[in-house]
Image: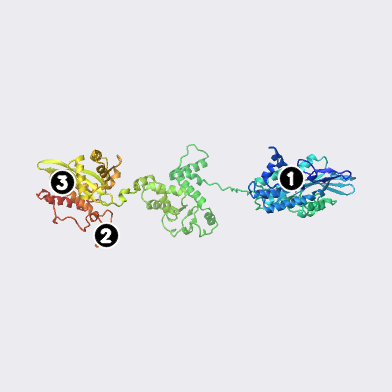
Amino acid sequence: MASETIQNDCAPIWGNILSGSGNFRIETISSRQGSFRKAAKFLCEDFYVDDGITSVSTAEGPIQLLKDTSEICSHGKYIQQRVTAAELDWDAPIPTEEKLEWERWLEDLKTIDKISIKRCMKKAGMDVQTTQIHVFNDASLKGYGACCYLRQVGKDGTVHTMLLFGKSRVAPLKPVTIPRLELQAAVIAVRISKLVSRELKLSFEEMYFWCDSQIVLGYIANESKRFHMYVANRIHEIHQNSTPSQWHYVKSKDNPADMASRGASVDELINSSWLSGPDFLKEHDVKAYKEANDVIRKVEEHDPEVKPVKVLKTSAAAPNIAHKFLKYSTFNELVKSLAILQKSVRKKTWKSVSATAEDMQEAEVLAIKRTQEMSFQEEIQTLKENKSVTKDSTIAKLNPYLDKQSILRVGGRLHRADITTNEKCPMIVPKYSHLAKLLVRHHHHRIHHLGRRSPLAATREAGYWIIRGASTVKSTISDCFACSKLRKPLQEQLMGDLSAERVQRTPPFSRVGMNVFGPYHVRERRSTLKRYGLIFTCLYSRAVHIEMLDDPSTDSFINALGCLTAIKGHVIALYSDNATNFVGAKNLFDKELERVSDPKMQKYLLDHRITFKNNTPEASHQGGAWEKLIRSAKAVLNGMAINYKERIDSQTLRTAFYEVASTLNNKPPTATNIRSLDEEIIAPNRLLTMKRGQTSALPPGKFTDSEVYGKARWKKAQQIADEFFKPGNLNI
């Protein structure tokens, strides 16, 4: 197919002036030796991009080849667009369907030399009387275009028409609505008319624009609605180069631009009205066709291209000074200001104006009246017409009525009572209004910040009925600073999560918290000595063990720790504050561990050593687990130290410590609700001894304060334990 020629109606036309014919005949490219020969060969033979590039020898060759190919295959742009939309690789072959269509189009171009166009725009021997320009446009999903025709009418009534200019474009790959494509075709039409008017050296009387889209004609004739940017810009360009009166409706069957939008073969082009124009242009009177096919040009209300218009409606209301009440924070200030304002208006002066009691009363009525007018306007108007308020009104149940001053009051059955009007029929105050808050605040301060019921009773006694007064009083009192100081509970800090040592399952006394308390004075022979208590508590089971210290030194602490491990077993970790004896013991253990030279012994000691963990300095709350137990123990032991001063010895104190620890271990770790005597309570002693009931084996009995002065030291210890176990002294 190398010898075939590729050309269509939209491509550049190469012609040859035939002698005597006066026609412009289209020739095939195969008969010419121009620069399009390579482009024709590329289109006919090469279906690969790389073959087209390798067929040229210079760097500028591919660019020139692309330009020539684009000019030749104007009609094939649609096929080219479909191939491009398929997103094929650069060396992939053209799909079979597009290839067959391409070959059919090339085969059809063999007959393009049948088309001949008259070169002269004026008919030979014609005496022209009227010259007109007619531009048609149309669009489809494939493409859009426009064509321009010259229409000449002779003095003898003959009509001559011919094609002046035609242009078509392929529709974009991105989906576009048909009305937008039709509008774009109309833009091309006015651009063609502008070009023809500038380049054609003829004078013409009229210019017509023909379009078969009623929507586009409505857009062009529109003078009231606003469009989105895409349509607005194109309508603006159309209005700049034409007037709405120049645009007319043409039937689709009479529109020659339909061929530019859909494409046509050579035979269809020859047999169509593309070259000579539609039949109605050849008639003597074009206006008759225009009037017969005229349509109503309007834009639909719900057209998607029309911008929605928002209309704001404002209405002037009667002036009401109730909104000015928000500036006042007390009821007295509001009433006084209104009283002075009324008196100043009456006297027409602002100088030396003071309010009397009568002025204050009038101002109070005015404040109520203006507030009611803002909230109960419909109810007041209904009552003025001698009608009852509707059932859906918020004050319908109050049976309201208007008094002589047009103030809404509560109705009732006390009209004959010998009491004041305000007591019989209180004035209605709207709920949550600023005036209601001022009234509640005023009477709340007047009764010295009593409870919620008192302000509500005071306002009703003063002659005001506040709608939903209880909730208004509640919200107003909640904002009272004085009541917050007097009645609001103190805020409590939210407790944090328990540490991992408190919730991880471990044997008793594996992780232990400890602290020292005291001192307690004991009598040894004739000397008075100080003794201290060292409390150990299991962080998981909450079991307690108390040892007595001779002094708060490191040596004494290590001895007590040895007693704990001998009785309760190995301790993994010790938690305490930063007391010097605890820190000294930790340092001592570290030094002794460093002195061990045997690696195996050192490894064993490292694996079985006690880990000391101290609280953060100045953070005693981190030791709350044992500090609370110390408080329970000291509550009795401190009193004992005062009552039995110098009457107990070290052995008795040690026994008392053990009794106290046993009592603490018999208490449940949490509060329990015992519903039956048969229910069993799990206490730390039950976990330690696996026995029920009391663990003491000493003889029972009642021990009095006199036992402290006796010789039996075990009775002294029991007296102290009984004192500890009394209700109210033990606080876990």
Q: Position of residue 214 (x, y in %)?
A: 72, 52
Find residue 536 and report its horizontal and vertical position in percent: 23, 47
- Kindly identify the amino acid type of the residue bearing the numbered disc 1: Lys
Q: Nearer the viewer, residue 564 or 99?
A: 99
Pick the residue in front: 22 or 625: 22
Q: Residues within 10 Å of mark 2 (few under 14, many from 20)?
A: few
Say what secondary structure mark 3 lies in.
helix
Q: Is residue 104 left or right of residue 22?
A: left
Give the amino acid type for the residue marked by disc 3 in the picture.
Asn
Mark number displayed over residue 41:
1
Q: Is residue 135 left or right of residue 320?
A: right
Q: Is residue 483 left or right of residue 230?
A: left
The answer to which of marks 1 and 2 sits earlier in the sequence is 1
Residue at left offset 10%, top offset 50%: 712
Kindly identify which residue carries mark 3: 643
**Looking at the image, can residue 680 be seen?**
yes
Q: How far is disc 3 from disc 2 in space, using C-alphas? A: 35 Å
For the residue pair 404 and 498, the one nearer the viewer reads as 498
Camera-nearest label, 1 or 2: 1
Nearest to the eye among marks 3 and 1: give it.
1
Which residue in the protein does label 2 denote? 674
Crowdedness near tag 1: few (<14), some (14–19) or many (≥20) residues, C-alpha within 10 Å = some
First of labels 3, 1 by sequence position: 1
